[in-house]
Amino acid sequence: MRHLTAKDFQVSAWSGGKTVQIAIAPEGAAYADRDFLWRVSSATVELEESDFTALPDYERWIMPLSGEMRLSHDGGAPVSLAIYEAHRFDGADKTHSWGRCTDFNLMLRKGRCQGRILALWQDAELEEARWVLYCARRAVAVNEIVLGEGEALCLDGEARIRFSAPGCLAAAEVWELRQS
């Protein structure tokens, strides 16, 4: 179990804002090299419109944490996402975005791992798995560790979550597929 704070995150600028890399596997992998199995991040989008980087080897999940977000994949009808609404799409899609927001992202190497993201609002018991829990709003206690807003916890195993005040955890669950 690792408690992560702002000093542990890797921050990078992109043409429309900044991305905070919360966790990546395997440890030491580089997003720019596209040599990772999975990656969890949060990004600020400061442009009214932007295009996503094509990642054809990855499945992607995204969830707005604040602001507004609409996405169109391969020129299709736009999908409006409510705050804390998770959306899965293929990283090979040509994806266009509208709206300024802060989002939570999970990228998964196709055929090597699977996962999902979700928002947690109330006390919960999470099953045994690999979890990256990001405190999106207010402080939340996880397995006796208090996460402040903008902090994260990476753990392999079960998690017990207690909300002492209204808050929200953005959660990524990841599992690697067995290779034959």
Image: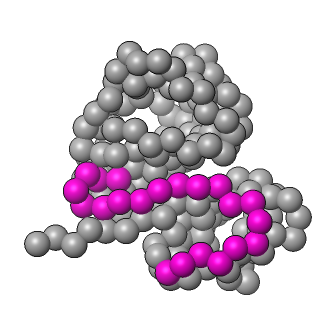
Rendered residue at 86%/59% (across/down): 166
Q: Is residue 7 visible?
A: no
Q: From the image, which quarter does the N terminus lie in?
A: bottom right
Magenta span of residues? 108-128
Rendered residue at 61%/33% (across/down): 81
Q: Is residue 148 above or below residue 31?
A: below
In this figure, which colouring scheme has been used for the structure?
one colour
Q: In the rendering, at what x and y percent does residue 151 appear?
A: 67, 61
Q: In the rendering, at what x and y percent does residue 39 appear?
A: 41, 54
Answer whether residue 79 is magenta in the image.
no
Answer whether residue 116 is magenta in the image.
yes
Q: Nearer the viewer, residue 53 or 4?
A: 53
Q: Main secondary structure of the magenta part?
A: strand
Q: Nearer the viewer, residue 95 or 80?
A: 80
What is the number of callouts on the image?
A: 0
Q: Quadrant of residue 3?
A: bottom right
Q: From the viewer's perspective, tell me whether residue 27 is left or right of residue 103.
A: left
Q: Is residue 127 visible?
A: yes
Rendered residue at 48%/64% (across/down): 173
Q: From the viewer's perspective, tell me whether residue 84 is left or right of residue 62.
A: right
Q: Residue furthest right?
A: 165
Q: Residue furthest front?
A: 77
Q: In the rendering, at what x and y percent does residue 38 appear?
A: 36, 57
Q: In the rendering, at what x and y percent does residue 34 appear?
A: 27, 47
Q: From the image, which quarter does the C terminus lie in?
A: bottom left
Q: Residue furthest left?
A: 180
Q: Is residue 146 above or below residue 70?
A: below
Q: Quadrant of residue 121?
A: bottom right
Rendered residue at 34%/21% (across/down): 74
Q: Is residue 169 above or below residue 103?
A: below
